[in-house]
Amino acid sequence: MQSKQAVNILSALAQESRLAVYRLLIEHAPDGLAASVIAQKLGLANATLSFHLKELSHAGLVASRQEGRFIYYSPVITAMNDLISYLTDHCCSQSDGNCTTGKTVTTRKPRATASARLRATVTQ
């Protein structure tokens, strides 16, 4: 991944509604959701949602497919995995591969959701 790609992804997610859309799609991966369902669940107007989906799509974070009259959006998991790898590779390059912060981190047991599958994919 190039620096410009990482900035585009981070910029796309640096907006509350787009982050909410992406998080919702991660929860429904890999099938995704129809645009109308996304709008309903997040309380977004269709035009607003369309703008946010365009931005996420432009950043390579979501893909769309048409089924009949509906357009379904799903997350592009590899884009997020590539971003995490890029950030990890570059943040750890000066620390002998040790990216710990020195703080104790308490983690909770991941749910058997798409979010947990994403975390499992990232760590493999």
Image (cartoon, rainbow, N blue to C red):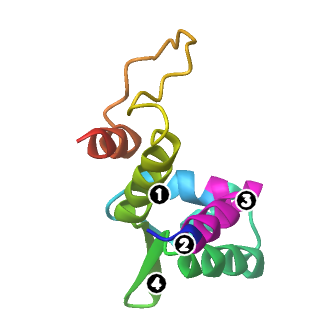
Query: Residue beneath label 1, please?
Result: 83
Helix, strand or loop at disc 1? helix
Distance in Å between CA atoms under marks 2 and 1:
8 Å
Q: Residue at x 56, y 58 (%)?
A: 22
Q: Residue 49 at x, y = what percent?
A: 69, 73
SS of the residue under disc 3? helix
The secondary structure type at the circle numbered 2 is helix
Q: Amino acid at mark 3?
A: Ser
Look at the numbered discs 2 and 1 and tell me whether their residues touch, using CB distance below 8 Å: yes
Up/down of 106 relative to 42, above or below? above
Establish if 38 lies above or below 55.
above
Rounded to the nearest angstrom, the CA distance separating label 2 from label 3 is: 20 Å
Apparent side of residue 52 relative to residue 67 in the rendered image (left or right):
right
The answer to which of marks 3 and 4 sits earlier in the sequence is 3
Q: Residue at x 49, y 71 (%)?
A: 2
Of labels 4 and 1, the one closer to you: 1
User: Which label belongs to residue 70?
Assistant: 4
What x and y, as percent, mark residue 91? 52, 42
**Secondary structure type for disc 4:** strand
Earlier along the polypeptide chain: callout 2 or callout 4?
Answer: 2
**CB under 8 Å between discs 4 and 1:** no
The disc at residue 5 is: 2
Q: Which residues are magenta?
A: 4-20
Residue 41 visible somewhere in the drawing? no
Q: Residue 17 — which label?
A: 3
Q: Earlier in the sequence, mark 2 or mark 1?
A: 2
